[in-house]
């Protein structure tokens, strides 16, 4: 068990950084615009991150496992660590951070190192989802923006009551965003450990039993909660500087769009439903919440006439598509090589 | 928890009423001010004028209380954090307009300017324009809280009335200085006319700021 937890530590570190960085996408705007208090928002987000991870987190993990079924603990540790390092490197260079993209690069690195064939169809689906994620987020944001603007124009609600409605909306969106983040992104954190999971089912009262994999997701989400409470306040301060130029309503639309996109890319049922309608499916795949936020901001910027869009942000988004997986791929290859040749640990089952 | 929410909503509704009452006070002030000038021109410092002047003082006093109440409640209840500063500024601006009405009315009471009858009509026109200007400012300001389209319509009226009052006051002052009155009387009447016209200028400044706040309020 101790060895397992040691190897899982890199995943938990990723979980911590997910909570520290991505939580600011969920409620950073609400706290930055002083509509919600940090402690309250962090508590709601944490509860729902845990629920999202445990209830729906496995859907996106299945897609990652189709891409590469990492079957030994040392390999999972290496891939997870290299993704975490890639994220840290990217953070330092100021490029849009995406744990989702780093982990895919890491898994492909494992595939190449172990001469395991990469499922190109799954990879293509995942890469397409990275491009579609900000685009869909932008479209949802534009739709919501136009609807909300129309409603506000005609409703003549007093500014004080508008304030209450927005606050309530932000609380609900924080919960939705937390759930979506857990459901969509927790696979990045512990997904590579699923095949080597050793946890046994855990009984929660009389009626509900967590499977071993759900216990794994619970641990990952708890690490994310620690990240939310220990570090996300700092991330929010940085986000706040950009965010304060929005009105709280726009800020709310941005978070809501981001959450909806994450949910769209987490649901196996929706994927099956779209396939049954002969429509292109939205695969259950981890996408970047940061890029969804940027997509929503650009969408609203365009709906307002295109003035004031920071195109440098868009460039950063696109550079993230390439840089994150590439750096993680190289690091994963090197780390696996170290793990196998220096530490003599198995990185693939014979 | 449920009770807390109910009381929060009740407090918000109360604040909404207080903001409405502040606007009602401005509209009331414009009407009483017009009445006060009419009485002064007819009866000078009569008992009737003293009572009307008292009424004006009371309105000023009430609106001061309402302003303070709005300011403290906005902070205590942590409401509209993004617009709070703007709303405080707006409320202060409205209060300044009310204060100026009070000051002018009080000045009539203290100084008792001797205004020749030939200027009554022009002075009453000026007072009418200035009062209408302040009334439209109050309507615009009320609309800022609910309906930004109405705000724009009424702010146009404020600009128009301010321009008209400028013209009326310039004409009146010119007529006063062209007359055969003593210089001291000319200067005294001129000061009164300027102060009455200042009310419209202040209302216009208030609308300028309000329109900027409205841009911020648009999503």
Image: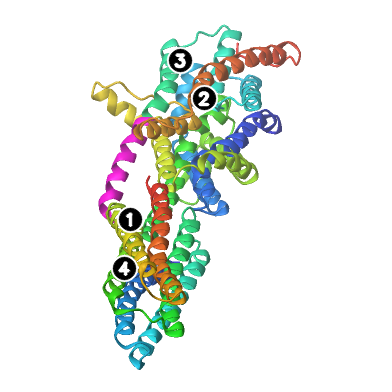
Q: Which residue is mark 1?
A: B159
Disc with the residue nearer the chain's start (2 vs 3): 3
Same chain shared by disc 2 and disc 1: no
Do the CB atoms of the residues marked 4 and 3 lie less than 8 Å apart?
Answer: no
Considering every residue shown, the one lying at the far top of the view is A115
What is the x, y in percent for residue B63? 43, 75
Same chain shared by disc 2 and disc 3: yes
Identify the magenta region. A137-157
Residue A336, above or below B197: above
The residues bearing labels 4 and 1 have C-alpha atoms spaced at a distance of: 15 Å
Q: Quadrant of the C terminus of chain A?
A: top right
The residues bearing labels 4 and 3 have C-alpha atoms spaced at a distance of: 77 Å
Closest to the observer: A171 or A70? A171
- Nearer the observer, disc 2 or disc 4? 4
SS at circle 2 = helix
What is the x, y in percent for residue A234? 63, 42
Classify residue A75 by image quadrant. Answer: top right
Whether residue A148 is in magenta: the answer is yes
Q: Residue at x 48, y 52 (%)?
A: B82
- Nearer the observer, disc 3 or disc 1? 1
Please rate how many residues cluster around mark 4, counting C-alpha atoms within 10 Å: few if below 14, some from 14 to 19, many from 20.
Answer: many
Which chain contains the residue that carries disc 4?
B
- Nearer the observer, disc 2 or disc 3? 2
Q: Which residue is mark 3?
A: A123
Do the CB atoms of the residues marked 2 and 3 lie less than 8 Å apart?
Answer: no
The residues bearing labels 2 and 1 have C-alpha atoms spaced at a distance of: 42 Å
Please rate how many residues cluster around mark 1, counting C-alpha atoms within 10 Å: few if below 14, some from 14 to 19, many from 20.
Answer: many
**Viewed as shown, does residue A337 lie left or right of A135?**
right
Do the CB atoms of the residues marked 3 and 1 lie less than 8 Å apart?
Answer: no
- Nearer the observer, disc 2 or disc 1? 1
The residues bearing labels 2 and 4 have C-alpha atoms spaced at a distance of: 56 Å
Tag on residue A267?
A: none
């Amino acid at each position: 068990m101790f060895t397992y937890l040691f190897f899982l530590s890199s995943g938990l570190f990723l979980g911590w950084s997910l909570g520290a960085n991505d939580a600011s996408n969920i409620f950073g705007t609400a706290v930055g615009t002083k509509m919600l208090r940090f402690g309250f928002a962090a508590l709601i987000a944490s509860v729902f991150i845990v629920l999202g991870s445990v209830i729906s987190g496995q859907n996106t993990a299945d897609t990652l496992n189709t891409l590469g079924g990492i079957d030994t603990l040392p390999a999972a540790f290496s891939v997870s660590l290299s993704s975490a390092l890639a994220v840290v490197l990217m953070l330092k260079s100021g490029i849009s951070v995406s744990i989702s993209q780093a982990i895919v690069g890491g898994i492909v690195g494992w595939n190449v190192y172990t001469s395991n064939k990469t499922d190109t169809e799954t990879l293509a689906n995942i890469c397409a989802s990275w491009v579609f994620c900000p685009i869909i987020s932008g479209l949802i944001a534009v739709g919501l923006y136009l609807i909300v603007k129309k409603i506000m124009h005609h409703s003549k609600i007093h500014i004080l009551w508008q304030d209450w409605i927005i606050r309530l909306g932000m609380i609900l969106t924080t919960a939705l965003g937390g759930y979506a983040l857990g459901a969509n992104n927790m696979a990045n954190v512990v997904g590579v450990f699923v095949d080597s999971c050793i946890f046994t089912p855990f009984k929660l009262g009389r009626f509900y039993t967590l499977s071993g994999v759900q216990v794994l997701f619970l641990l990952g989400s708890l690490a994310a909660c620690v990240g939310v409470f220990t570090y996300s306040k700092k991330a929010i301060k940085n986000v706040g500087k950009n965010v304060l130029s929005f009105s709280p309503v726009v800020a709310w639309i941005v978070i809501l769009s981001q959450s909806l996109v994450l949910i769209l890319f987490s649901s196996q049922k929706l994927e099956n439903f779209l396939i049954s309608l002969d429509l292109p499916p939205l695969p259950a795949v981890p996408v970047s919440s940061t890029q969804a936020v940027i997509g929503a901001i650009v969408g609203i910027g365009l709906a307002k006439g295109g003035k004031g869009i920071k195109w440098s942000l868009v460039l950063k988004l696109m550079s993230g598509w390439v840089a994150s997986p590439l750096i993680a791929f190289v690091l994963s290859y090197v780390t696996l090589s170290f793990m196998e040749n220096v530490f003599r640990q198995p990185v693939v089952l014979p | 928890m449920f009770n807390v929410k109910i009381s929060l909503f009740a407090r918000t509704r109360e604040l909404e009423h207080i903001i409405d009452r502040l606007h009602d006070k401005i509209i009331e002030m414009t009407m009483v001010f017009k009445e006060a000038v009419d009485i002064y021109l007819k009866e000078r410092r009569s008992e009737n004028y003293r009572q009307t002047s008292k009424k004006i003082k009371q309105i000023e006093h009430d609106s001061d209380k309402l302003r303070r109440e709005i300011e403290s409640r906005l902070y205590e209840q942590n409401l509209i954090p993004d617009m709070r500063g703007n709303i405080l500024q707006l409320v202060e601006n409205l209060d300044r307009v009310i204060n100026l009405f009070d000051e002018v009315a009080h000045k009539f009471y203290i100084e008792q300017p001797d205004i020749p009858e030939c200027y009554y009509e022009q002075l009453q026109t000026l007072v009418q324009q200035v009062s209408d200007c302040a009334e439209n400012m109050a309507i615009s300001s009320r609309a800022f809280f609910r309906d930004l389209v109405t705000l724009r319509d009424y702010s146009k009226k404020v600009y128009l009335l301010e321009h008209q009052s400028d013209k009326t006051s310039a004409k009146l002052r010119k007529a006063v200085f062209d007359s055969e009155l003593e210089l001291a009387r000319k200067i005294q009447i001129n000061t009164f006319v300027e102060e009455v016209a200042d009310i419209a200028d202040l209302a216009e400044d208030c609308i300028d700021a309000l329109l900027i706040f409205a841009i911020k309020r648009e999503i």
